Image (cartoon, rainbow, N blue to C red):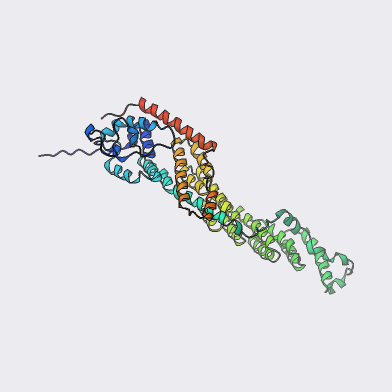
Amino acid sequence: MKERFRPVPLPSPVLLPTPHALALRMILQLGVRPSWFDTFSTTMSEGHSHIPGTPSAGDLRGYMIDSPRVGDSAVPEMILKVLEAYRKEGCLLDDGRVRLYAKVVQNSTLRLAFAAAIFGESMEALFWLQLPHALNHLMNKLINKSQQKGQHAAPTPEIDEASMLSRISSKGKSAAGSGRKNVLVSGQLKLMAFEQQELWQCANERIPWHEKLEGEEAIQNRVHELVTIGNLEAAVSLLLSTSPESSYFYVNALRAVALSSAVSSSLLELAVKVVAANMVRNDRSMSGTHLLCAVGRYQEACSQLQDAGLWTDAATLAATHLKGSDYARVLQRWAEHVLHAEHNIWRALILYVAAGALQEALTALRQAQLPDTAAMFILVCREIHAEFLSRLDSDEEATSLKDNVLNLPGLNPANEDVIAVGEYFGQYQRKLVHLCMDSQPYAD
């Protein structure tokens, strides 16, 4: 006999009408008992209704694993009634996915990742899986910051670059011989000079002649004269004025950095910054950042790497050398680039959270018009935050640390944006219920 085989249909929630698909997504996000997907459990006779975990037909909200903490509490029951036709036909989730959902339903982040993956949103699923790590990273940073608050050494004074530039452009030691201007008479006697002031005076007379000449050779002679009279600051200033297009740029940059190190650490940092900036102008950003790292200017090195589009390199350098707000600033700028240039909101959200910019993350979700995701984001962040606090010890030191992370920055319940997200989510739920009721389910 010729046998005829029919393929077994696999449920695909993506193929449901859009309102019904969104309704199923919301139910999966809020958390429904896996028994609801069992077509046998709700079609049993009344005599079997005493089985534990099986709500009666008139109390569909009992299928929710917990009363919703956001939005309208009456919406889940209405959505369950709308989806009842699909559930009876067994065309929502197949048995394998129901078993998988049963394993993750008690964990909010895993449940949200499951809901995203079911609808093909793989990047969103990865976001939910990574969110606890990013948030714990942020809270650990906050705690470490409070512990090290009193242990920091005196801050290094910032370089007054304006005064430094004006100082190195002055004559400095070149005026040292002005008091003995008439000591030597012009002529052959100058050739017999041997005292310091006399030699300086002769050199200072030669320098203006070199200034009047043009070309690299004249500049090299001026630098040489300035070094011989000990005016290293003026020599460094002259060397730093070399154009990046010049063939002498690298030689002069090397001498400028070497000579500035003999004057002061402040001048060395300033010289390195100027050289690095000129290197960036000629697309030699990595060489410039290496110089900045050599003098400890890691924040500026990260900025130059980001300006050159090397975002991952900048974040790696920041993670190695920067802490606190300096590190967060690098991550937040990266997040803004990912959001606005790469248009990858899920990756940007993780970077925002790791940087402590929860307010910006919430704003991005609102601007993307994702009311359900914004509400779930607040809910999950609070759950992770509460779990983190519960892990802290009960001693006095831990109690003081708890006070520093008692409220998540930007997600305080009294925050206007947080309140607006809750209200917007409620409106979205009610609108979705109306759309579901107006849309007829597919019939086989």
Instruction: Give the left or right position of residue 369, taking residue 185 as reference.
Output: left
**Residue 211 versus residue 167: which sits nearer the camera?**
167
Quarter of the view holding residue 35: top left
Q: Does 61 appear above or below 358? A: above
* Left or right, residue 109 beside residue 414: left
Q: Residue 272: horizontal and vertical position, in percent? A: 64, 59
Give the number of callouts.
0
Q: Residue at x 46, y 50 (%)?
A: 390
> Measured from the top left, where is residue 45 in percent x and y?
22, 32
Work out which quarter of the rendered image holds the N terminus and state it. top left
346 lies above or below 292: above
- 235 relative to 84, above or below: below
Which of the pair 301/194 is nearer the observer?
Answer: 301
Q: Is residue 268 visible?
A: yes
Above or below, comparing residue 237 to residue 358 in the picture: below
Q: Residue at x 27, y 29 (%)?
A: 443
- The spot of residue 97 in percent (x, y) is 30, 43
- The outermost residue toward the left is 1
